Amino acid sequence: MQLALASLLVAALLPLVWTVCAKAGAPYDNARPREVLARAVGYRQRANWAQQNAWEALPVWLGALFAAWVTQLPPALVDAAALVFVAGRVLHGVFYIADRPTLRSFAWLAAFASAMVLYGAALLRA
């Protein structure tokens, strides 16, 4: 379960990593910080989109881990799903920024499927 908890930390930090990628080197106005991202183009815009998607994925993963914990799923299953989720989410952001939409979609699917495996296993065990 230690890997599962670490995956939650990574999932919570990934949006911030992609935000740094989106804002790095861009002119910054602390009075209007969101305007920088609203005007972003190219890889900065895609990094912002990766950041938004990472926030959207976080509650799905949190719910999957909660379901796994409540139903006491086997730690090996939860940890395996956590590794797939983290790898998928990291690759999703990298492929998003690199403008590789097909690879990005496969990475998204792997991460999403890992969460669905935990939801499904929890439902069967409940």
Image (tube, rainbow, N blue to C red):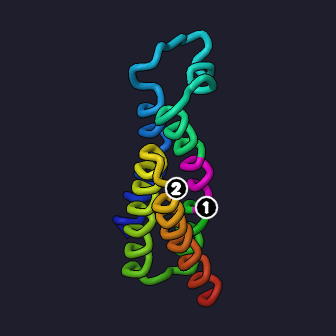
Q: Secondary structure at mark 2?
A: helix
Q: Residue at point 46% right, 26% down?
A: 23
Looking at the rendering, which quadrant does residue 123 occupy?
bottom right
Q: Residue at point 55% right, 62% down?
A: 61
Q: Residue at point 40% right, 78% down?
A: 75
Q: The N terminus lies in which quarter of the figure?
A: bottom left
In the rendered view, would you say 101 is above or below 78?
Answer: above
Q: Is residue 85 magenta?
A: no
Say which of 79 and 100 sits in front. 100
Q: The C terminus lies in which quarter of the figure?
A: bottom right
Residue 13 visible in the snapshot: no
Q: Secondary structure at mark 1?
A: helix
Instruction: Report the span colored magenta.
Output: 53-60
Residue 37: x and y, percent? 57, 26
In the rendered view, would you say 78 is above or below 61?
Answer: below
Characterize the magenta stretch by its predominant secondary structure.
helix
Residue 7 visible in the snapshot: yes
Residue 79: x and y, percent? 38, 73
Point out the frontmost of discs 1 and 2.
Answer: 2
Q: Residue furthest bottom?
A: 124
Report the amino acid beneath label 1.
Val
The residue indicated by pointer 2 is: 101
| Drawn side of residue 108 relative to residue 84, left or right | right
Q: Who comes first in sequence, dot 1 or dot 2?
A: 1
Report the amino acid beneath label 2.
Pro
Separation of residues labelled 1 and 2 (CA atoms)? 22 Å
Q: Residue at point 61% right, 56% down?
A: 59
In the rendered view, would you say 51 is above or below 42?
Answer: below
Indicate which disc residue 99 carries. Answer: none
Indicate which disc residue 60 carries. Answer: 1
Residue 58: x and y, percent? 56, 54
